[in-house]
Image: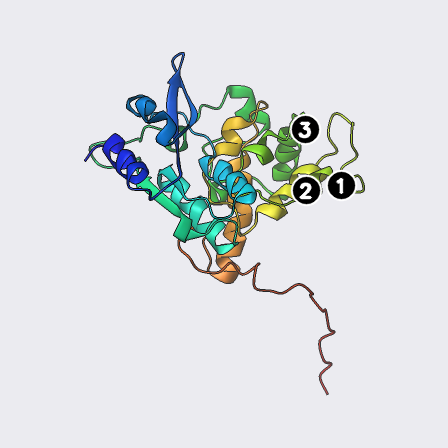
Amino acid sequence: MTIINQVEQLITQNKVDIFLGYKDLDGHLIPHSFTRDNLDELPQLQVGENRYSLEKIATHLTQKNPDIKIGIIARDCNQRALNLLYVWNQLDPKNIETVNVNCCPSPLKPHGDCSYLEPKQSGTYKKEHGIDFNMDPETLMDSYDNTERFSRWMYEFGKCIKCYGCRNICPVCFCTECSLEHPSLVEPGVLPVDIPIFHLIRATHMAGRCIDCGLCEDACPSHIPLRLLYREVNQIVSTVFDYSPGAGMEKSPFNIIGDKVVLEPKPMDA
């Protein structure tokens, strides 16, 4: 059964009120909603290399109407985001229907059809002074000492123009009040942004939450290797808590700590 047939069934059988997918507009795939009112547009539903936070759109719709039933095109990264949003009670899995799209690499298809799976190109200057997009946390640790890593990250952070693109595109950013807009943490109206505090705040916030979709890095106009940054903090979470965000419906170690954390001194040995 084709994707279009699956979506048509979901809509006509009243399993969803709205389906979130992609539609071609002047040669570019953009997010589009399909309902009973525009079923004639369904043949224009497409899936390609373009990606957006369809799950983020779903959370906004749910905030306005908690009972709305939503269908959504789901790549592997979309499903991880949905799993995490379920765990954090931002979406109800009973109200979500997915049409899965296989975008993962295989022996016959070394790379999928989206930017998440395609290697990025790093220029010569970036490799000399910054951080190569294609590094992993282990390679970064092995290649540079603490002073060199700090210097290279500061080079990358120094390019930030505080556009908030990384936050706005993130499918698992759902806070009603954003720490990145708190005047006591990040002074408003100041450019260049205070470094490294802006990105350290966001990196800390992404610990145990980032599902490694790479959309933040795609959206960054300054080409900061944000995906690697969040992979570094998530590696700590994995080591300490044995937890991988979005891998399943397991509760996050950070949403079961409680509303109040009490720090007590360690008892002295007798």
Q: Which residue has dot 2 on it?
A: 178
User: Residue type at mark 3?
Assistant: Lys
Give the mark count: 3
Q: CA distance from mark 1 to mark 3?
A: 13 Å
Q: Are marks 3 and 2 in contact (CB under 8 Å)?
A: no
Q: Earlier in the sequence, mark 3 or mark 2?
A: 3
* Label 2 SS: loop
Q: Residue at x 67, y 43 (%)?
A: 201
User: Residue type at mark 2?
Assistant: Cys
Residue 23 - label? none
Residue 132 visible = no
Q: Which residue has dot 1 on it?
A: 182
Q: CA distance from mark 1 to mark 2?
A: 7 Å
* Label 1 SS: loop
Q: Where on the picture, by quarter, is residue 185?
A: top right
Say which of 248 and 120 sits in front: 248
Residue 162 - label? 3
Say which of 19 and 102 sits in front: 19
